[in-house]
Amino acid sequence: MKVYCGFDPTADSLHLGNYLGLVALKWFQLCGHEVFCLIGGSTARIGDPSGKSGERPIMSPKVIERNSVRIEESIKRILGPCVKVVNNLDWIGSLSFLDFLDTIGRKSRVGSMLNRESVRSRLESPTGLSFAEFSYQLLQAYDYAHLYENYGVTLQIGGSDQLGNMQAGVDLAKKFRPDGETLHTLTFPLLTTADGKKYGKTEKGAVWLEADRLSPYSFYQYLVQAQDADVINLLRKLTMLPEESILEAEEELLEAPLSAQRLLAETLTRDLHGEDGLASALKATDLLKPGSIVDRSQLSSELLLSLTGDLPVVTVNRKKLREISLKSVLLMLKLGKRSGLEQLLKDGHGYINNQRLEAGDRRISEDDLLDGQVMLVGAGKKKKGLVRVKDEPGAR
């Protein structure tokens, strides 16, 4: 069987919710089926109204193209070289409006389109629904018809919120070839918590799959903090672990708290960021936990620089480095107020590279830098930040 799942390039990285579709495709691969990933280079310009209370922001073609390239690279890294990646810009981009009406519009019925839940909910909302968004389901439907006609794809998979659009694809393909093969759709439940909330969001946004959008450390930390009520479901949906291992993890939940969470976090971090990414995440976890005392020999500039998205960062001019005290740096990082930091340092609770200083403040120096680039500073055991050094004039 040939099966496909679609991804609109609305960002330059896929997120944890998208990964559910990639895991489903992995299972099809293991069973010997041929898998396709469709990148919506055309549909991203419209925006899927499903599950949205308003119209998506308009994206420029250049941004969509850049996102498409990144997402294709990510898909091939996750699914391997055997996956077939296609972009609907190749067949929709050149379609004129008259061709669209003649090819797709004639075979589509407005009544069926209005009955889609994604359409009805938006029509009843204060924002309404634009004609462009209303037409989105026709473009997605045409994708299925095109893949069936040109590649022999007979199964589309996707999240349960896509059922209406997916069924529209089956209907349209049948009208193109009434005597064709039977086409199928398969939906999977969206990634949610036990209380029904959408899973995969943090205070900073989505749980991205690319390391330059979310560090392996932050990715690991998000998963290792999963609730007991969610972790077994996540192990089943997001990993390829055998059922025996998952049942064993479930049994250990009461006796070994967080054991299942660590299994989830380590497995997914390894799957997406490799052994090096997992090692980096584990080192950072040890480094940043409150009260951690890590020997300087175990620190590296590479490790600290990988945490610039996770910790507050201040950049100083190398020429002014010797003029700056630890207290000044902690103030710049907003790790406390002046009076509180003065007392904290007086009590001997200042840290440089996780090493506790003797009572009092002191100036920082080149010797504190790792590879002449960066240092870790702390105000007490919990509040930590990074100091980067630049040679450019005017850096602060």
Image: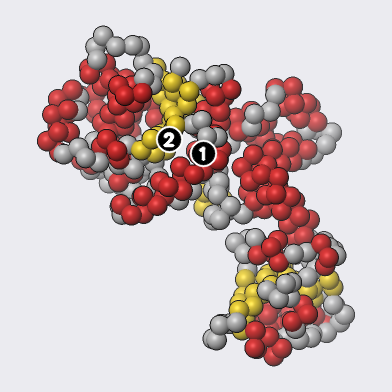
Q: Secondary structure at mark 1?
A: helix
Disc 2 residue type? Val
Residue 245 image position (x, y, % from top left): 75, 26
Query: Which residue is nearer to you in this view: 388 or 187?
Result: 388
Q: Residue furthest bottom?
A: 323
Which quarter of the rendered picture does the N terminus lie within? top left
Specify the label residue 85 is tagged with.
2
User: Which x, y percent locates residue 58?
Assistant: 30, 52
Left or right side of 217 for 50: left
Q: Which mark is residue 76?
A: 1
Q: Is residue 120 left or right of residue 331?
A: left
User: 10 Å neighbourhood of mark 1: few (<14), some, or many (≥20)?
Assistant: some
Residue at 24% from the left image edge and 11% from the top image edge: 178
Q: Amino acid at mark 1?
A: Lys
Image quadrant in which the C terminus is located: bottom right
Q: Distance between the Cα atoms at labels 2 and 1?
A: 8 Å
Residue 16 circle label: none
